[in-house]
Image (spheres, coloured by chain):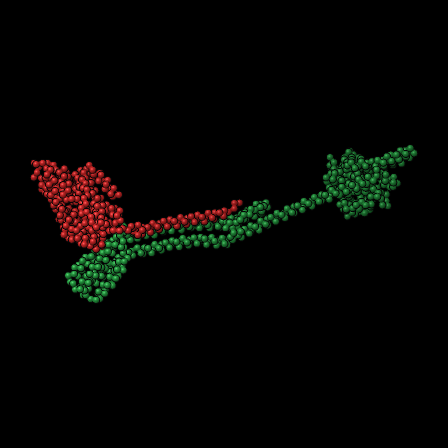
Chain colours: A red, B green
């Protein structure tokens, strides 16, 4: 006769305790997950000393995203927070409005691409009056009271473009169109240096045969640029052999129009900035080249300027960033860089 | 029958009632605890669910308050009424209270930074609003118009910012709401799972606890079956518990043990009695034997033989032939008598001893005894214990015919029957009552009178020796039809 095992009761109780403990732990883990998700803003949020805003003319563009990214990284090192201020009202607000908003919000610094308008200038001045330093990027407004400009010297930019255009010029080239955005005071200088760079290098017999045309797209409406570019391709008489774009939106529009109007091979587009579309096009040989600013430098220098101003009370009024040329040969490098930046 | 005694465990010390109560309380308590836990958490989640959109509500209140401020400024600018001014100050106070709840630090979070912007913008806005009111009071028309325009623009910006924040919050809250909804459904599954696990554990506990009650009962029943089959040597199981079953098991064990002890005692005493009886019997035999040897030792037989032989020769020399024969027969008789102590004799020797004895008696009593014998041929060599027939004949003489008035006769016959000889010694003497016969056969009567005038061997001795020799009972029978009718003693001698 086998006596009953009283120990089994203890085993059962131990098993029960284990199950209860496991369930409790699982429960805690699960609830902790929920709590964390709910309170992450309070738990993980880091507090900063300064608050800067970047006011882009198009917050969705990769160029601005890249600048914002590098500025954010640079600011973090300096215990500052960068906010991309540009999508409050679904495009109803202009950068000008955002400058007003930034002033009202009493931020510690503004990074902006001025459009050359008087309103913008006065807004920059107002910010300065409110004690908020303004740094301009890509384009400059020297007449305003901005503290620093981070970008290219207009003359250098024009020359650089001119040099690249020359590489695309052949015997059949008759018309070169350069697209500018209206309102930028530097446009004229850029165009002049560009034209000079081309004409100085053309052989004697070709001089005067090539028409170099500057086209300023009026900034009346957001979608004007696209229409103007399509018009260029539509009309065979006005269609340029080389189309030079000075911003990333124009570059993509031009590329799309060229493909749509079946002008691949007959029109050379010189693009701006390393957007995926342009990089793909360069890789396939559809677009011969694109110029791109070093956005990493742009973001970092902007923050450096603002920080310098806050600590020293002054900063250098111009900081030059590098301009790169993307061709079929080096396109992979830029793609890798871009991927790295995204990482 | 033994039992190991060990210290009972926790469940062993409890009574069945306590065990049942404990089982119920444990399982019910477990279920209750799980229920409370589950309901507690579900309740908490429900409360959180209710509060998910609380931030949206407070943002809406902020917007309303801002609208009120803007409205009262407009009203004041239009009417300059003190009521609107009062409303304005009250609204500003309310707004400031609400504004206090907004984040004002620079934090790495989209919504928090927007809150900070709204808060700073609100500060600027309130400053502008104050400026507007002051300009209106000072009737500085240009100034308050400009300030109001600026204020209105900022008002729009703030509204937009709040709207933005509201939709961000809404998105975030909706995510949280979804998470909570998911967690509720997860809790449903988890709750069911936990319930199932707990139910299984409850069953296990019930099974184990009930087993501690039923198992000892089963073992007890098995032990009882064993005892019922007559096996008192069972090994009793260890009493696992001190409950009611444990008590019954103990009592049962004690009962079985005492029954066994009783049986052992009875057996022992019976054996003792048997032994005592045997000893008694043996002692009696020895006594008899000693008695006989004593009697035999009273006469020095060799001296007697020699003396009798000398007497016989003397009688022969004096030509007293009858005396000589008498003395010779006397010598033969005593010789046989002495030799009988050796054990067995033939029937012929026994018959000769009887002849001698009768001759001696007839000499003594002047031929009063008529003795006749008839012996079947071929039985002389049958062996039987010595000194058997002579005592029977002596008995017939002493108790049968000695005292009678008529001439006493004794008939001795030896007949062969199936597997045995029948020796009959019949007299025509006093006879015996049936009661007397029974007494004699059962050995109650001691031959006291014969001690003086006999060879010393009684009937009871004859019976005993016959029975011992042949290993049978009832070899000697006495028949008599009553007093005065004579007696017949019949011996059965088994042979071949």
Which residue is nearer to you in this view: A112 or A282?
Answer: A112
In this view, A250 is above or below B146? above
Q: Residue at x 17, y 64 (%)?
A: B138
Label total for image = 0
In the displayed structure, does residue A28 sit left or right of residue A299? right
In the displayed structure, does residue B341 sit left or right of residue A11? right
Residue A183 in view: yes
Which residue is nearer to you in this view: A153 or A163?
Answer: A153
Residue A266 image offset from top left, x and y in percent:
13, 38
Which residue is nearer to you in this view: A298 or B224?
Answer: A298
Q: Residue at x 57, y 51 (%)?
A: B251
Toward the front, the furthest residue is A312
Dividing the image into 4 quarters, which one contains the C terminus of chain B? Answer: top right
In the displayed structure, does residue B48 sit left or right of residue B74? right
Q: Residue at x 10, y 39 (%)?
A: A199
Residue A296 image offset from top left, x and y in percent:
22, 44
Residue B171 in view: no
Toward the bottom, the furthest residue is B82
Q: Residue at x 20, y 51 (%)?
A: A133
Residue B344 image offset from top left, x and y in percent:
77, 36
> Which of the 4 image quarters holds residue A174?
top left
Residue B226 image offset from top left, x and y in percent:
57, 46
Toward the right, the furthest residue is B318
């Amino acid at each position: 006769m086998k006596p009953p095992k009283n120990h089994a009761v203890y085993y059962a109780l131990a098993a029960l305790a284990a199950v209860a403990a496991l369930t409790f732990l699982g429960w805690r883990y699960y609830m902790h997950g929920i709590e964390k998700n709910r309170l992450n803003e309070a738990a993980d949020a880091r507090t900063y000393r300064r608050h800067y805003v970047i006011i882009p003319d198009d917050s969705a563009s990769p160029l601005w995203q890249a600048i914002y990214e590098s500025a954010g990284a640079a600011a973090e090192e300096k215990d500052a927070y960068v906010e991309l201020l540009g999508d409050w009202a679904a495009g109803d607000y202009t950068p000008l409005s955002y400058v007003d908003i930034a002033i009202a919000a009493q931020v510690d610094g503004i990074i902006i691409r001025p459009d050359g308008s008087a309103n913008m200038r006065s807004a920059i001045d107002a910010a300065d009056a409110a004690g908020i330093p303004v740094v301009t990027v890509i384009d400059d407004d020297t007449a305003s009271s901005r503290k620093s400009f981070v970008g290219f010297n207009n003359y250098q930019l024009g020359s650089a473009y001119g040099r690249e255009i020359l590489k695309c010029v052949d015997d059949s080239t008759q018309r070169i169109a350069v697209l500018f955005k209206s309102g930028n005071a530097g446009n004229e200088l850029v165009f002049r240096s560009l034209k000079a760079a081309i004409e100085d290098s053309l052989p004697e017999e070709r001089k005067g045969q090539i028409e170099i045309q500057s086209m300023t797209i009026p900034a009346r409406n957001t979608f004007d640029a696209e229409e103007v570019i399509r018009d260029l391709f539509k009309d065979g008489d006005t269609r340029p052999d080389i189309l030079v774009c000075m911003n990333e939106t124009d570059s993509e529009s031009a590329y799309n129009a060229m493909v749509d109007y079946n002008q691949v091979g007959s029109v050379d587009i010189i693009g701006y900035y390393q957007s995926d579309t342009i990089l793909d096009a360069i890789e396939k040989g559809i677009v011969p080249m694109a110029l791109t600013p070093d956005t990493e430098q742009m973001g970092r220098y902007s923050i450096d300027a603002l920080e310098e101003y806050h600590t020293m009370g002054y900063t250098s009024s111009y900081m030059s960033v590098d301009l790169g040329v993307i061709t079929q040969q080096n396109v992979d490098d830029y793609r890798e860089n871009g991927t790295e930046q995204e990482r | 029958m033994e039992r190991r005694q060990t210290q009972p465990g926790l469940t062993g010390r409890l009574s069945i009632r306590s065990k049942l109560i404990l089982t119920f309380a444990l399982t019910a308590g477990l279920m209750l605890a799980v229920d409370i836990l589950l309901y507690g958490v579900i309740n908490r989640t429900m409360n959180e669910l209710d509060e998910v959109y609380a931030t949206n509500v407070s943002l809406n209140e902020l917007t309303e308050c801002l609208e009120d401020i803007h409205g009262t400024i407009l009203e004041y600018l239009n009417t300059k009424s003190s009521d609107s001014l009062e409303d304005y100050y009250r609204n500003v106070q309310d707004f400031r209270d609400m504004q206090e709840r907004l984040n004002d630090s620079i934090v790495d979070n989209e919504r928090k930074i927007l809150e900070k912007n709204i808060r700073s913008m609100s500060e600027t806005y309130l400053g502008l609003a104050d400026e507007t009111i002051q300009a209106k009071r000072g009737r500085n028309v240009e100034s308050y118009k400009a300030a109001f325009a600026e204020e209105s623009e900022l008002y729009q910006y703030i509204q937009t910012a709040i709207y933005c924040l509201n939709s961000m919050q809404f998105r975030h809250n909706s995510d949280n709401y979804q998470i909570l909804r998911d967690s509720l459904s997860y809790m449903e599954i988890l709750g069911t799972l936990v319930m199932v696990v707990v139910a299984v554990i409850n069953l296990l506990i019930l099974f184990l606890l009930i087993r501690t009650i039923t198992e000892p009962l089963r073992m007890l029943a098995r032990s009882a079956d064993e005892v019922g089959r007559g096996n008192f040597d069972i090994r009793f199981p260890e009493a696992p518990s001190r409950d009611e079953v444990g008590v019954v098991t103990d009592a049962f064990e004690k009962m079985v043990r005492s029954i066994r002890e009783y049986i052992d005692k009875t057996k022992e005493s019976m054996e003792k009695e048997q032994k005592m009886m045997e000893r008694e019997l043996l002692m009696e035999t020895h006594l008899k034997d000693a008695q006989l040897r004593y009697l035999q030792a009273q006469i020095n037989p060799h001296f007697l033989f020699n003396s009798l032989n000398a007497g016989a020769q003397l009688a022969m020399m004096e030509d007293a032939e009858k005396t000589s024969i008498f003395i010779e027969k006397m010598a033969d008789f005593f010789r046989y008598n002495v030799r009988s102590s050796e054990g067995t004799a033939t029937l012929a020797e026994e018959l000769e001893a009887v002849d001698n004895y009768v001759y001696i008696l007839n000499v003594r009593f002047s031929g009063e005894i008529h003795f006749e014998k008839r012996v079947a041929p071929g039985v002389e060599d049958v062996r039987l214990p010595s000194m058997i027939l002579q005592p029977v004949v002596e008995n017939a003489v002493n108790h049968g015919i000695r005292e009678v008035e008529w001439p006493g006769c004794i008939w001795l016959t030896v007949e062969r029957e199936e597997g045995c000889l029948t020796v009959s010694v019949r007299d025509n003497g006093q006879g015996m009552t049936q009661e007397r016969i029974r007494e004699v056969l059962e050995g109650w009567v001691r031959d006291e009178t014969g001690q003086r005038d006999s060879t010393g061997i009684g009937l009871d001795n004859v019976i005993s020796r016959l029975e011992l020799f042949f290993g049978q009972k009832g070899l000697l029978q006495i028949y008599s039809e009553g007093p005065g009718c004579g007696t017949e003693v019949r011996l059965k001698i088994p042979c071949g």
